[in-house]
Image: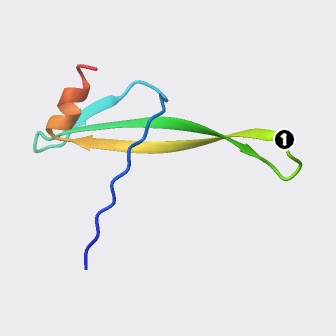
Amino acid sequence: MASFNKIIIVGYLGRDAQIRYTPQGTAVSNFSIATTERRKDKSGEFQDVTTWFRVSLWGKQAENLREY
């Protein structure tokens, strides 16, 4: 049985997105988004934990990214 997971990532753009095209002409864009979460460690001190997400967009979504 197949499953589908959907997530929404809200964070900071790591650097400008790069767009390229496959030999067949399909647009591909790659970029990174960072999210930061504040947690308490074992000693009770707050620590910032940053998680990086690598994102790839294909086709029309990659082309639309250029506008933003």
Task: Tell whether 6 sits left or right of 64.
Answer: right
The one nearer the camera, 49 or 63, is: 49
Mark 1 residue element:
loop
Task: Tell whether 41 sits left or right of 39.
Answer: right
* On screen, residue 31 above or below 23: above
Amino acid type assigned to the residue bearing label 1 in the image: Glu
The one nearer the camera, 36 or 16, is: 36
Q: Work out which residue is located at the far bottom of the displayed protein and give it.
A: 1
Residue displayed at 33% across by 60% down: 5
Name the image quarter holding the N terminus: bottom left
Q: Position of residue 28 (x, y in %)?
A: 24, 39
Residue assigned mark 1 = 45
**Crowd band around label 1 with a 10 angstrom C-alpha radius: few (<14), some (14–19), many (20+):** few
Q: Position of residue 20 (x, y in %)?
A: 25, 34
Q: Quadrant of residue 66?
A: top left
Q: Work out which residue is located at the far left of the displayed protein and give it.
A: 24
| Numbered marks: total | 1
Task: Tell whether 47 sits left or right of 68.
Answer: right
The one nearer the camera, 29 or 47, is: 47
Q: Quadrant of residue 35?
A: top right
Q: Position of residue 56 (x, y in %)?
A: 32, 43
Residue displayed at 25% across by 74% down: 2
Name the image quarter holding the C terminus: top left
Q: Quadrant of residue 32?
A: top left
Residue displayed at 46% across by 36% down: 33
Q: Work out which residue is located at the far right of the displayed protein and give it.
A: 43
Color encoding of the figure: rainbow
Q: Position of residue 47 (x, y in %)?
A: 76, 40
Residue displayed at 33% across by 30% down: 18
